Amino acid sequence: MALEDQGISINVEKLKAKLKERYPEYNFDVPAPPDTTCKARAFCSADRQMYTDTEGNTFCGQRYKQTDKDNPYKWEWMTCHALVKPAEQGGKQDGFTF
């Protein structure tokens, strides 16, 4: 479902200009590095659920319950998504033979 279908339009170029004006030193073209801090250390160390992305980076996929700050009885499932092992750059690539 697109935002335009609901009548909400975002002028991306205007937003980019505002951000460049507010933060002139920051380079928005460079993506942020992946998060390496584990959100649920007690669960991640015991039984790790791992997944890899298309580049070969290994991430933690452990789920945990995140409680609300105001209501301790309200919670929702969250996933850690911390970078555990970065992909090796270069080297021999397996699976492709010519």
Image (spheres, rainbow, N blue to C red):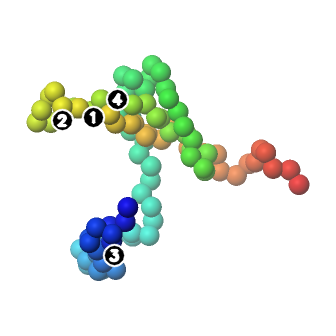
**Relative to 90, 40 lies left or right:** left
Q: Quadrant of residue 43?
A: top left
Dot 4 crowding, Cα within 10 Å, few <14, some 14–19, many 20+: some
In the image shown, does 61 or 5 lie closer to the viewer?
5
* Residue at 30% in and 78% down: 11
The residue singled out by tag 1 in the image is 76
* Residue at 44% in and 23% down: 45
The spot of residue 70 in percent (x, y) is 11, 36
Disc on res. 68: 2
Disc on res. 12: 3
Dot 3 crowding, Cα within 10 Å, few <14, some 14–19, many 20+: few
Mark 3 and mark 1 lie on one chain; the one further toward the N terminus is 3
**Relative to 98, 83 lies left or right:** left
Q: CA distance from mark 1 to mark 2?
A: 8 Å
In the image shown, does 93 or 91 lie closer to the viewer?
93
- Look at the picture and state if 60 lies above or below 25: above
Q: Are marks 2 and 4 in contact (CB under 8 Å)?
A: no
The spot of residue 54 in percent (x, y) is 60, 50
Q: CA distance from mark 3 to mark 4?
A: 34 Å
Dot 2 crowding, Cα within 10 Å, few <14, some 14–19, many 20+: few
Q: CA distance from mark 2 to mark 4?
A: 13 Å
Q: CA distance from mark 3 to mark 1?
A: 31 Å
The amino acid sitting under disc 2 is Asp
* Residue at 38% in and 61% down: 1
